[in-house]
Image: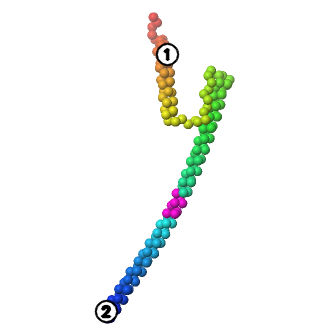
Amino acid sequence: MRSATQGAKSVSRAAYLLSAGLAVLLGCGAAHAQDLREIQARNAAAHVLEDARRDVLQSQIAASDARERAQTQVTLRDLNAALTTGPVVLKDIAPPPVTGDAMLSDAEFNASMARLERLTQAALEQGNGRMRAIRPASEPKE
């Protein structure tokens, strides 16, 4: 009987130690989970702050761009006014109007650049034709 009692005591002692070990592990696991939740909360707060900082920076950039566009339009308007009303009128045609939308789409910009390239090439060909028409002084006169 004694061995049965000792066997039961050792089984209950083993069960007690096993349950105590599990309680410690679960307690550590719960503390670890709490630490992870705190880390996640800090990271989420840091992301919110970063998003807010990025939004403020984008609004500052947009405001700066708007100021630059407005200043450019004022400068262009002044230059256009001086072009037709200054002490020396450089053109006989009215200056193009300054539009409110200074931003061109990519297609419009590419079309403008292609037109500018065509006009440049035409002017270059015309100038080259004039230069070819001039006889050098070294050529004999007929």
Q: Which stretch did the figure color magenta?
A: 40-47
Image position, residue 95 (x, y; %):
62, 26
**What residue is pinned by disc 2?**
3
Q: What type is the residue that disc 1 sits on?
A: Arg
Question: SS class of the residue under badge 1?
Answer: helix
Q: What type is the residue that disc 2 sits on?
A: Ser
With 34 as the anchor, is 83 left or right in this view? right
Colour style of the rendered protein structure: rainbow
**Circle nearer the viewer, 1 or 2:** 2
Magenta span: chief secondary structure: helix
With 30 as the anchor, is 57 left or right in this view? right
Asked if residue 90 is positioned above or below residue 60 in the image, the reply reads: above
Query: In what quadrant of the picture does the C terminus appear?
Result: top left
Q: Residue at x 46, y 11 (%)?
A: 138
Q: Residue at x 46, y 15 (%)?
A: 132
Q: Residue at x 58, y 45 (%)?
A: 61
Residues 126 and 50: in front is: 50
Image position, residue 114 (x, y; %):
48, 28
Indicate whether residue 41 is drawn in magenta.
Answer: yes
Image position, residue 13 (x, y; %):
38, 86
Q: Earlier in the sequence, mark 1 or mark 2?
A: 2
With 94 as the anchor, is 29 left or right in this view? left
Number of callouts in the render? Answer: 2
Indicate whether residue 73 is drawn in magenta.
Answer: no
Asked if residue 36 is positioned above or below residue 22 in the image, the reply reads: above
- Disc on res. 130: 1
How many other residues sit within 10 Å of disc 2, few (<14), some (14-19) or many (≥20)? few
How many other residues sit within 10 Å of disc 1, few (<14), some (14-19) or many (≥20)? few
